[in-house]
């Protein structure tokens, strides 16, 4: 559940975006910890999807702050 689309981000409120960003970062930490321990990831594409979702979320938040 790491992918977040632009439509979902736009539909969220500011508090929901912050909490979802925190969840995504925690998920990324877990994936990186699993990788560093040498385990085989259950979903190798999860790294890329999570990283991109975090970037998408931060970009939208920065654009919103810039427009205010």
Image (tube, grey):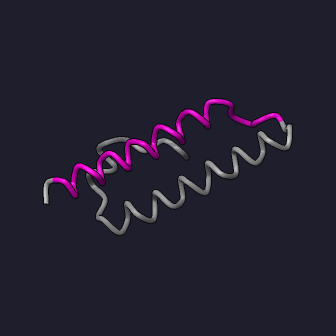
Give the residue at x 27% y 55%.
Answer: 11
Q: Is residue 45 magenta?
A: yes
Magenta segment's dominant SS is helix
Find the residue positioned furthest to the left.
68
**Is 48 drawn above or below residue 68 in the view shown?**
above
Q: Is residue 39 left or right of residue 6?
A: right
Q: Is residue 44 left or right of residue 16?
A: right
Position in image of residue 6 (x %, y %)? 32, 42
The quarter of the picture where residue 7 lies is top left
Q: Is residue 44 left or right of residue 53?
A: right
- Could you tell me which quadrant the C terminus lies in? bottom left
Q: Which residues are magenta?
A: 40-66
Number of labels in the image equals: 0
Find the residue positioned furthest to the front.
66
Give the residue at x 85% y 38%.
Answer: 39
**Is 8 drawn above or below residue 39 in the view shown?**
below
The quarter of the picture where residue 19 lies is bottom left
Give the residue at x 62% y 30%.
Answer: 45
**Is 50 drawn above or below residue 10 in the view shown?**
above
The quarter of the picture where residue 44 lies is top right
Position in image of residue 34 (x %, y %)? 78, 45
Q: Is residue 13 left or right of residue 38?
A: left
Find the residue positioned furthest to the right.
38
Position in image of residue 18 (x %, y %)? 40, 63
Find the residue positioned furthest to the top.
45
């Amino acid at each position: 559940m790491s992918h977040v689309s632009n439509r979902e981000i736009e539909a969220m409120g500011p508090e929901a975006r912050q909490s979802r960003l925190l969840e995504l970062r925690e998920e990324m930490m877990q994936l990186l910890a699993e990788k560093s321990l040498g385990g085989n990831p259950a979903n190798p594409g999860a790294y890329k999807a999570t990283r991109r979702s975090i970037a998408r979320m931060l970009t939208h938040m920065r654009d919103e702050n810039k427009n205010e």
